[in-house]
Amino acid sequence: MGAPKQKWTPEEEAALKAGIQKYGIGKWSTILKDQEFSTDLQSRSNVDLKDKWRNLKFMANGLGSRHRARVSSKSSQLIIKQEEDTTTSSMVVDTDMEVIGVTSIAASNELSQDVIFKKNIPRLDYVI
Amino acid sequence: MGAPKQKWTPEEEAALKAGIQKYGIGKWSTILKDQEFSTDLQSRSNVDLKDKWRNLKFMANGLGSRHRARVSSKSSQLIIKQEEDTTTSSMVVDTDMEVIGVTSIAASNELSQDVIFKKNIPRLDYVI
DNA sequence: CAATAGGGATAGGGTTGC
DNA sequence: TGCAACCCTATCCCTATT
């Protein structure tokens, strides 16, 4: 094992969120190359950023980890999908820099759903 | 609520140790997939293997269970680290199939420490 | 080939039952 | 009550795809 397990610090988490605000979801390498974030994220790879974001997403939706969410009943299943084209997506961020929402628009024949979440107070009623 | 506490048999324990000899520490799923061990370990998961190995490790180091070990003073703390590349690691096993030692070699600039243990007679003097 | 998405595996803290 | 066995899940790995 390269690193025995490097826990994410609040600084790293904040840098990741700020990077997502600036470039959008899925632009992990772009975020890493930005001097604004590269200092805090020095010890992280683009894959690390992807994995951490996945984890944050599921933490925020109030259902716990992604594995727990997968065993929920089909009727209440949350299927979260991101749109790759940042020009068609928007993000909502509160004053504390907590990402509270991401809305994406389906392109062409690709299915898409909105993902809306908040860190401490899940707003599942917003989710369709 | 989970499984009714299935105690490890000597056969299972031996299979686990043999698997570790063959593939190295941390290759739990690989061990389970090997037909040589899958029979004896049929009722065990990769996580079970990991947990059992952790118990064996702490039993062997003479400090008792891992929960007790956590309250020991920093100066006497044992920090155990494994090298992932099995081609650079070796293991020493006695005739009774008791794992008595594992030595790993640091790769490139990565720090590494040896872990040496014995089941009944701790050999802490071997640990640096 | 560099990067991303997603499934899968591992590590380590926490919990439970005997 | 201590400990072996088991659970939870953040982090890390592997592979397919583009």
Image (cartoon, coloured by chain):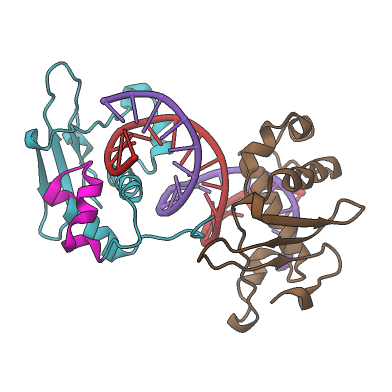
Chain colours: A cyan, B brown, C red, D purple
- Would you say residue A38 sits in the magenta stretch? yes
> Residue B43 sits in which quadrant?
top right
Give left or right: position of B14 versus A30.
Answer: right
Q: Nearer the viewer, residue A8 or B23?
A: B23
> Residue A42 sits in which quadrant?
bottom left
For image coordinates 11% across by 44% down, the residue present is A91
Q: How many marks?
A: 0
For image coordinates 16% across by 62% down, the residue present is A36
- Would you say residue B55 sits in the magenta stretch? no
Q: Give the range drawn in magenta.
A: A20-39
Q: Position of residue B61 (x, y in %)?
A: 75, 68
For image coordinates 72% across by 74% down, the residue present is B127
B70 to B30, vertically: above or below: below
Please indicate, yes or no, whether residue A118 appears anywhere in the rendered image.
yes
Q: Position of residue A55 (x, y in %)?
A: 34, 46
Q: Position of residue D14 (x, y in %)?
A: 50, 37
